[in-house]
């Protein structure tokens, strides 16, 4: 009887299995990953984020003067349209900068004040980027002289902004928004301005 009881005890002990700490950790991480994925999916389905769109609606040059020393004085009057098509997301623009480029050189710069863009909102931004005694590269100066004679100049407008998204009461961390708008064909102010050709921008966040 004692021998039979001992055999049963050994058999019961052999049936137990232990889970290693590494396997337990992997299971926990996998579970957390699945939970986070489900939360992100639910958030996306509820919010359905839509990319931000930018365009240049109008552009003109005033006070143009290119000195014999190759220094540019001019004001670029730009009308930008920021389109937030999201139904549940508003945008905080904590900093906003606009630059006008010609070839590989920046001509003018402006920093409009911060603003908040509501949901499903088109915001028109009237910006004046100023060049005050801006020394130009030789090739840029020659190109600008040729364009002045032609009456039009093609430039690139670049936007750089530090933004946060707001969904309900929650705000995200800061992101950098960049918009590249080219070519923006600008007429010099002495000529009667025809209808401006809208320029759509490539936007990256």
Image (cartoon, rainbow, N blue to C red):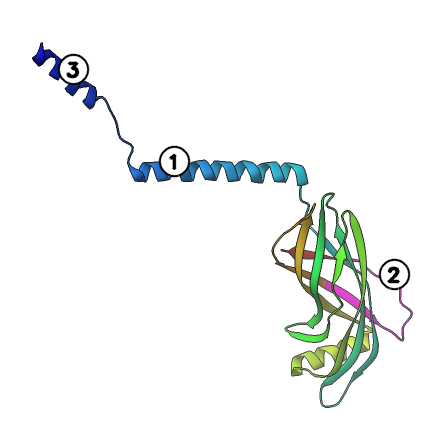
Does the magenta segment cover residue 195?
yes
Of the numbered discs 2 and 1, the one sitting upstream in the chain is 1
Q: Is residue 78 left or right of residue 140?
A: right
Between 153 and 55, the residue placed more toward the observer is: 55
Q: Quadrant of the N terminus?
A: top left
Please name the residue that numbered disc 3 is placed on: 8
152 to 170, vertically: above or below: below
Mark closer to the chain start, 3 or 2: 3
For the point 65% across and 82% down, which residue is it? 137
Structural crowding at the residue carrying mark 1, measured as other residues with C-alpha within 10 Å and reported as few (<14), some (14–19) or many (≥20): few
Tell me whether circle 3 and circle 2 mark residues in contact (CB < 8 Å).
no
- Counting other residues with Cα less than 10 Å from the Cα at mark 2, is it few (<14), some (14-19), or many (20 or more)? few
The kind of secondary structure element at disc 3 is helix
Q: Residue furthest top?
A: 1
- On residue 195, the disc is 2
Examine the image and state in which quarter residue 82 appears.
bottom right
Write the start and end of the magenta stretch as one range. Answer: 183-199
Residue where numbered disc 1 is placed: 27
Q: Residue at x 66, y 58 (%)?
A: 163
Q: How many marks?
A: 3
Q: CA distance from mark 2 to mark 1?
A: 64 Å
* Residue placed most toward the observer, 46 or 71: 46
């Amino acid at each position: 009887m004692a021998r039979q009881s001992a055999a049963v005890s050994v058999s019961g002990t052999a049936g137990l299995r232990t889970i290693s700490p590494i396997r337990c950790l992997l299971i926990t991480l996998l579970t957390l990953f699945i939970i986070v994925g489900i939360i992100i999916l639910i958030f996306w389905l509820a919010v359905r984020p839509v990319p931000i769109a930018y365009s240049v609606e109008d552009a003109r040059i005033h006070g143009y003067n290119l000195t014999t020393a190759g220094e540019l004085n001019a004001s670029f009057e730009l009308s930008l349209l920021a389109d937030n098509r999201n139904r549940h997301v508003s945008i905080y623009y904590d900093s906003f900068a606009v630059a006008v480029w010609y070839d590989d050189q920046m001509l003018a710069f402006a920093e409009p004040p911060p603003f908040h863009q509501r949901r499903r909102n088109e915001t028109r931004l009237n910006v004046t980027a100023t060049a005050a005694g801006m020394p130009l590269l030789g090739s840029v100066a020659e190109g600008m002289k040729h364009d002045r004679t032609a009456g039009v100049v093609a430039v690139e407008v670049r936007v750089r902004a530090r933004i946060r998204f707001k969904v309900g009461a929650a705000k995200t961390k800061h992101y950098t928004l960049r918009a590249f708008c080219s070519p923006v064909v600008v007429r010099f102010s002495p000529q009667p301005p025809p209808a401006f050709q809208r320029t759509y921008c490539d936007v990256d966040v």
